[in-house]
Amino acid sequence: MQKAGGPRGEVVLRDPKAIRALAHPARLLVIQRLFSGEPATATSLAEVAGLSASAMSYHLRALERFGVVERAEPTGDGREHPWRATGRTIRVDSAAPSATMAVEGAVIGAVLDSTRQEIDRFLAGQADEPQEWRDAVGLDSGAVTVTLQELAQLRDDLAALLSPYRTVLRTRPPQGARRVRVTTIVVPRD
């Protein structure tokens, strides 16, 4: 486990064991949920994943071992012990890409599947959405021609553009704010 950018910055995973630890569906769910910025208990995460609280605790401890999640301060009367992400974003940077390619593909596939499910839910219920929210929805997909340095800058610029809106940073969103899925994919193509 390596962390960069301070305690709430980017979590970078380079160890093949840490990368493989991400492949379990319950762990992917934990990452998606906690990296949205909302702490959660093992019990609440277990309910979403369809696991027992003890099984979810096992997965949380595994992710903790690799520096992906950590225990948050107890809430309320101190009986609830939530977990939180150790950073705002997570990045896989394998030292041995051939050893982790299948796992990286599974992680990316799970994120894309989750995004697709959210889009499908929106489309199925869009008739119930206010017109102004329907009008604000967008899809932009295309190719750009960039150098390696420009590609890195583009990735960083997109992350910087989204940063002020991330739940983890926005503790008091304005009245009427809603959670919105934003997916950016920056990958070279033939």
Image (spheres, grey):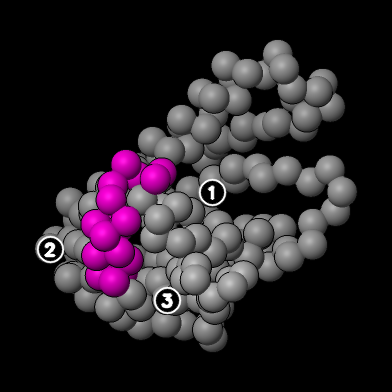
Residue nearest the observer in this picture, 154 or 181: 181
Q: Is residue 157 above or below residue 131?
A: below
Q: Is residue 140 above or below residue 67?
A: above
Q: Specify few, some or many for label 3: CA neighbours under 10 Å numbering under 14, 14-19, or 20 or more.
A: some
If you read the primary sequence from the N terminus, does the residue marked by circle 1 or circle 3 appear first? Answer: 3
| Apparent side of residue 28 relative to residue 154 in the rendered image (left or right) | left
Q: Which residue lies most toward the top here?
A: 127
Disc marking residue 70 = 3
Magenta stretch in the rendered image: 47-63
At label 3, which amino acid type do we have? Glu
At label 1, which amino acid type do we have? Thr
Q: Which residue lies most toward the left here?
A: 99
x and y percent of residue 104 in the render? 26, 55
Q: Which residue lies most toward the right here?
A: 175
Task: Name the element at disc 3.
Answer: strand
60 inside magenta stretch: yes
Q: Specify few, some or many for label 2: CA neighbours under 10 Å numbering under 14, 14-19, or 20 or more.
A: some
x and y percent of residue 34 in the render? 49, 60
Q: Which residue is mark 1?
A: 184
Q: Looking at the image, which residue is at 78% across and 29% down?
A: 133
The residues bearing labels 1 and 2 have C-alpha atoms spaced at a distance of: 25 Å
Q: Which residue is mark 2?
A: 99
Magenta-highlighted stretch: main secondary structure?
Answer: helix
Q: Is residue 160 visible?
A: no
Q: Specify few, some or many for label 1: CA neighbours under 10 Å numbering under 14, 14-19, or 20 or more.
A: few
